[in-house]
Amino acid sequence: MPNDPESPASPAAATRAVLVIDDDAAVLDSLVYLFALYGYRVLTAPDGRRGLEMFREHAPAVVVTDILMPEQDGLATIEQMRRERPDVKIIAISGSGRGDKNDYLSAAEKLGADVALEKMDLAKLADILPALLKP
């Protein structure tokens, strides 16, 4: 039902939805828990390709994406999302991996991420959530 605020098609539900894209189950679970504490409906995807599918289907207000993932990395995901919906808030996260994570975070910001953080800096993420998630 489109007027049901809990319906995925509802504009109210979309503004309350956060999409978390990460191939690390422990990180995914931590972020789901954090966003749920703030009262947001949390959608998840294990890679950028599936993340884009969820993004298109549910139109979340905020996307949190890892950078190094299988299928499609976070940089390509950020670039595509920014083209499709310039207004979406995007948080890029990166942990250890090939190369310097700061290079990946800098590249994510250049492609349009609103915020780029080290993967497990949950305290900082919690601090910026209220400002990022304002309607």
Image (cartoon, rainbow, N blue to C red):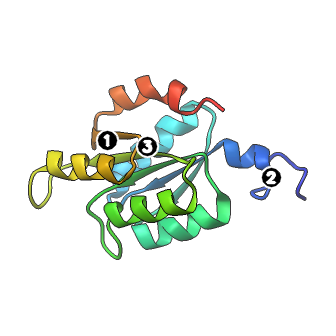
Outermost residue toward the bottom in this view: 71
Q: Earlier in the sequence, mark 1 or mark 3?
A: 3
In this view, 128 is above or below 65: above
Q: Quadrant of residue 49?
A: bottom left
Q: Secondary structure at mark 3?
A: helix
Residue matched to label 2: 10
Numbered disc 1: secondary structure: strand
> In this view of the protein, can residue 54 be seen by the observer?
yes
Q: Nearer the viewer, residue 28 or 60?
A: 60
Other residues around mark 1 within 10 Å, as few (<14) / some (14–19) / many (≥20): many
Instruction: Kindly identify which residue carries mark 3.
Output: 31
Q: Nearer the viewer, residue 46 or 78?
A: 78
Between the residue at mark 2 and the residue at mark 3, the CA separation in whole angstroms equals 24 Å
Say above or below: 43 vs 54: above
The extreme left residue here reads 99
Q: Is residue 23 visible?
A: no
**Which residue is pictured at 24% across the width and 47% down the height?**
105
Which quarter of the figure has residue 30? top left
Query: How many labels were placed on the picture?
Result: 3
Q: Which residue does the image show at 40% across and 61% down from the upper left?
A: 79
Kindly identify which residue carries mark 1: 116
Gap between marks 1 and 2, in whole Å? Answer: 29 Å
Q: Position of residue 88 (x, y in %)?
A: 55, 48
Q: Secondary structure at mark 2?
A: loop
Point out the frontmost of discs 1 and 2: 1
Amino acid carrying mark 2 in the image:
Ser
* Foreground of the two, 15 or 33: 15
